[in-house]
């Protein structure tokens, strides 16, 4: 079988009939005296293959009987439609070459999530993981396409950083020659320098936070897609976020129907993201909805916890942008909203920040966090000190307010949060090939 032209299983099925050569791995096997049934898989799909005694040499039949799950093999044969086969086609094998007979595969039915995480290097080949990886590929591709086609430049920040941005508690400290630095918690502070050169920029890159809480939506290493733009206010910025989500969902619903089906994801739950407008509400309005519709009392000034976000989102089937959180609970760089009487809706009892969170429906929680950045040096100094940081370390950042400062805004989208939501996964760990959390650093 050396000189055959191999095609993928999907291509073979698209061909509908005739002779084909395919190769892949044994997904399932079943044997009797006269037949060996192999479901073969490759990256494109699975197909049932039949090896009949008498139709191949005795030697080949003998060898085929030895094939265990995940053995690698090449088949040549005749493909035809078969309603009873798992993907509607069957390959009648005429020739076969075994590449490697696998040892007994450690992953069998009904394994615990922890066991599957221990075996992640092997579990990646499962249909579930393969479908996720394809959806993830679409999501990341869509993010690049969305920004590039809207005039954004890709811009990179260092991963080794001397400063904190999202608060000291989730920093990963790294030995850096004789000194120490931190792994990037965000690209943002550097992006704020980048916009003075390129104005509209974006990036998708690894992000590190030593999250000590064990939740189903926090990873220690995740991919964040961020954008930053000069001359942009908060409202315009949150609109970009809505458009980005819509664009991602359009792409996935076009390119990954089959994968969503493999995952058993109800597509009608995803349709509103391409069909509907997403509402924007204030934090204060969110509290009102929680009180009136969910009977939940949240004191003004407290951050929304997971449980409150979930309750709030029971009333929506699209993402919701929540704006104007209390200034006190926000990171230092988020600008205070100066309310203009008669122009702005003043529904808050205290100072609010020009920031937004986008919350996903079905309990998938926050997927985007963004803000209009503070341009007032005095204010920034005050908050940096309040966080217990030395303003000297932020001198370069404050320079950006000294040399042609302009209003600007940006946000970060958690790639795994979006992938988890699209796939309908219980836990974010399934949305990345090799998850890293407080309790998991291998394989
Ligand atoms: P949360 O309150 O859920 O911890 P955050 O407010 O810390 O989120 P931001 O700092 O605004 O999040 O980061 C922007 C986005 O990055 C979030 O909206 C989320 O989608 C994603 N993100 C943040 N932390 C994590 C994490 N530990 N694992 C995966 N994604 C994350
Ligand atoms: Mg966080």
Image (cartoon, grey):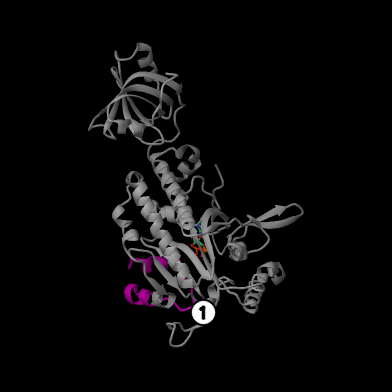
Picture residue at 41% right of the left edge, 55% below the top? 248
* Relative height, residue 24 to residue 169 (above, below): above
Residue under circle 1? 337
Quadrant holding the C terminus: top right
Q: Position of residue 53 (x, y in %)?
A: 30, 15
The answer to which image quadrant residue 332 occupies is bottom right
Q: Position of residue 62 (x, y in %)?
A: 37, 15
Give the side of residue 261 with respect to residue 243, left or right: left
Is 415 magenta? The answer is no
Give the side of residue 120 with respect to residue 183, left or right: left
Q: Position of residue 357 (x, y in %)?
A: 46, 67
Q: Position of residue 283 (x, y in %)?
A: 44, 75
The answer to which image quadrant residue 69 occupies is top left
Helix, strand or loop at mark 1: loop
Picture residue at 48% right of the left edge, 74% below the top? 325
Q: Give whichever of 32, 15 is nearer the camera.
A: 15
Q: Start and end of the magenta stretch?
A: 288-316
Picture residue at 53% right of the left edge, 69% below the top? 409
Quadrant holding the N terminus: top left
* Relative height, residue 291 to residue 309 (above, below): below
Number of numbered labels in the structure image: 1
The answer to whether residue 215 is seen in the rendering is no
The answer to which image quadrant residue 286 occupies is bottom left
């Amino acid at each position: 079988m050396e000189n055959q032209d191999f095609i993928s299983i999907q291509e073979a099925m698209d061909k509908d009939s005739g002779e084909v050569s395919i190769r892949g791995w044994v997904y399932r096997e079943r044997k009797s005296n006269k037949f060996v049934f192999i479901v073969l898989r490759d990256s494109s799909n699975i197909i049932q293959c039949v090896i009949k005694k008498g139709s191949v040499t005795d030697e080949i039949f003998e060898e085929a009987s030895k094939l265990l799950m995940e053995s690698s093999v090449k088949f040549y044969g005749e493909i035809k439609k078969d309603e009873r086969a798992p993907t509607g086609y069957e390959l009648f094998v005429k020739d076969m070459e075994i590449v490697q007979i696998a040892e007994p595969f450690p992953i069998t039915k009904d394994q615990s999530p922890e066991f599957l995480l221990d075996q992640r290097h092997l579990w990646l080949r499962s249909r579930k993981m393969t479908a996720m990886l394809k959806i993830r590929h679409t999501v990341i591709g869509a993010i690049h396409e969305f920004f590039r086609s809207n005039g954004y430049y890709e811009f990179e920040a260092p991963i080794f950083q001397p400063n904190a941005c999202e608060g000291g508690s989730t920093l990963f400290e790294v030995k850096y020659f004789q000194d120490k630095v931190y792994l990037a918690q965000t690209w943002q502070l550097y992006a704020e320098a980048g916009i003075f050169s390129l104005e509209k920029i974006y990036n998708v890159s690894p992000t590190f936070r030593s999250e000590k809480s064990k939740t189903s939506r926090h990873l220690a290493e995740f991919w964040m897609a961020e954008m930053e733009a000069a001359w942009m206010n908060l409202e315009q910025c949150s609109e970009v976020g809505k458009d980005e989500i819509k664009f991602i969902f359009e792409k996935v619903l076009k390119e990954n129907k089959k994968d969503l089906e493999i995952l058993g994801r109800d597509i009608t739950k995803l349709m509103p993201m391409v069909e509907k407008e997403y509402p924007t509400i204030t934090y204060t309005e969110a509290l009102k909805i929680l009180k009136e519709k969910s009977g939940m009392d949240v004191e003004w000034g407290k951050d929304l916890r997971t449980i409150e976000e979930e309750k709030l989102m029971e009333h929506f089937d699209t993402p919701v942008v929540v704006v104007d959180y209390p200034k006190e609970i926000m990171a230092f760089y988020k600008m205070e909203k100066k309310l203009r009487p008669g122009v702005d809706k003043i529904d808050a009892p205290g100072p609010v920040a020009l920031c937004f969170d986008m919350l996903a429906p079905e309990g998938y929680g926050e997927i985007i966090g963004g803000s209009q950045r503070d341009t007032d040096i005095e204010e920034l100094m005050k908050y940096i000190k309040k966080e217990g940081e030395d303003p000297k370390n932020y001198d370069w950042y404050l320079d950006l307010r000294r040399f042609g400062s302009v209003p600007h805004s940006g946000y970060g989208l958690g790639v795994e949060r979006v992938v988890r939501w699209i796939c309908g996964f219980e836990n974010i760990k399934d949305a990345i090939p090799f998850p890293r959390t407080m309790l998991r650093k291998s394989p």
